[in-house]
Image (cartoon, rainbow, N blue to C red):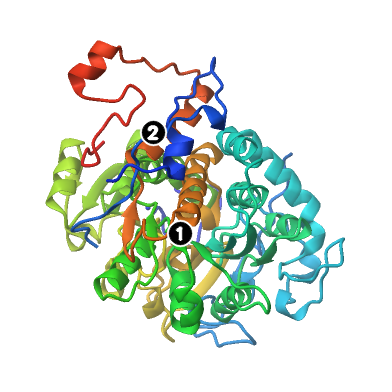
Amino acid sequence: MSDSQGDGKLELKQASKDVKESENVAEKYSAMTVTKNSEMGIGDIAGVPAAFTPVAGHKPVKKQIQFADDKQEFSRFPTKTGRRSLSRSISQSSTDSQGSAASYTDSSDDETSPRDKTQANSKGNSDFCVKNIKQGEFGRREIEIAEQDMSSLISLRKRAQGEKPLAGAKIVGCTHITAQTAVLIETLVALGAQCRWTACNIYSTQNEVAAALSEAGVAVFAWKGESEDDFWWCIDRCVNMEGWQPNMILDDGGDLTHWVYKKYPNVFKKIRGIVEESVTGVHRLYQLSKAGKLCVPAMNVNDSVTKQKFDNLYCCRESILDGLKRTTDVMFGGKQVVVCGYGEVGKGCCAALKALGSIVCITEIDPICALQACMDGFRVVKLNEVIRQVDVVITCTGNKNVVTREQLDRMKNGCIVCNMGHSNTEIDVASLRTPELTWERVRSQVDHVIWPDGKRVVLLAEGRLLNLSCSTVPTFVLSITATTQALALIELYNAPEGRYKQDVYLLPKKMDEYVASLHLPTFDAHLTELSDEQAKYLGLNKNGPFKPNYYRY
């Protein structure tokens, strides 16, 4: 896609276009501040109050990139082929393991579904389903590279693996399967857990990483380009294993939790804890809790400070541009962009686009977020007011039907539409699968949806999460989230009976502060220490927590 006209004439018009005091694990691992010049073992950590509080009133190396043929036309109304589902893909090639820039491919067997293959790792184990187990060596290199920028998680692994705090834990996980997630999974295994894993997004799996994990003995059921049927089949294979029953859930989006709750209610009742990291998944947990149907304690990682203020904000600030540039090659200086939602994800996206010279507008339902946008120099509008003029539309609300078919009909030729929220509900993609519209795949994860009058809308990743579907995300910031998830799992699994009721809990400030302190040495940052007199004056413990639970960063 290009914004300028070259020597040859383009057929297109110019296209431009998200408390009780107790000896719990949070205390055990948290009462310390790590600096570059000080190293403290687990035995040095003092116990401090860190009971979790239910949330009240929460409202809900360099490789060649392979793409599809330069242009690949699809039928005006694609039909289901084999296991391919319209709701997940428009054709076989749209769900092939063509890969993001971080994914190696094996084009020789791209047309064969992994479900139709018989594969085994070097140890003869076949309890997995990935694209190609032979890619494991490449995946191992990816994981080793990620480990270099996730030193804090590796540090936690080394400190705690002697105690095996997750011995006996059987964790079933549903997250993005990337090199960074693999470091988390292997940390959980090193701490004593048995893990079975599947993907929360049909496009974000790095096939070589899934192969490396399977080669290492982790039961992984995932590949890039799954159909909807494949997606749920993989989840079921993770849960429904003879002689193995999960007792912990690590989820991203709530699909795994929903599946176990609906399909295996007896298993769900025996789960000792759920750790959820996304806005969408947390919302579903609160719905279950409000209806009195949540029969296990759950940890809301998404609203922890270390997740929301770092992963959501800083990760999206960098990865939004990575995803857009890799898929469109568009110059964003001077482009009119509307970002739907000004939460932490929206803030990160807007900051990046503004820095490139884009003219950014915001849509918001929350007056507080809207006021923040205004004070940050953004115009707050209704989408219908600007839909005919904007070059790019980005959704990051966690809601559904944020961009409707009516608004898609009114967009200008070449408008780019994408989503930075977790699920694919924000853009009404289903309404575009009609006989009068033609879908044209122009490169991996990039579709031109063509109207009868010739207008084209550029749809990225079929409305799914842009950054993990079309590019990669910064490893360091994912280390922060992964460390938080690991500590939350340790706490829930080791908590004595009765500490946590059937409710949704937030992480304590002490754990957030501990996770942050683990990552400060990377920047050679040195914390100032309170004197006894200063601590007394502020009414604080010298070792933290330094802010009350109600403090908003």
State the mark number for residue 465.
Answer: 1
x and y percentages locating residue 108 in the rendered image:
81, 68
Residue type of the residue flagged with mark 2: Glu
- The mark closer to the camera, 1 or 2, is 2
Disc 1 is placed on an element classified as loop
The circle drawn on residue 513 is 2
**On the rendered structure, is 164 left or right of 211?**
left
Q: Is residue 357 left or right of residue 459?
A: left
Q: Position of residue 74 (x, y in %)?
A: 57, 78
User: Is disc 1 surrounded by few (<14), some (14 to 19) or many (20+) residues within 10 Å?
Assistant: many
Rendered-image quadrant of the C terminus: top left
Front one among 135 and 498: 498
Q: Regarding mark 2 in the picture, which secondary structure is present there?
A: helix
Q: Vertical placement of 96 versus 158: above or below?
A: below
Picture quarter containing residue 450? Answer: bottom left
Tell me what residue is drawn at x 44 percent, y 82 percent.
Answer: 262
Q: Measured along the vertical axis of the image, is residue 290 above or below residue 60?
A: below
Q: Residue at x 55, y 63 (%)?
A: 173
Residue 426 seen in render: no
Report whether residue 146 is seen. Answer: yes
Image spot of residue 456 (x, y percent): 42, 67
Image check: 44 left or right of 413?
Answer: right
Mark on residue 258? Answer: none
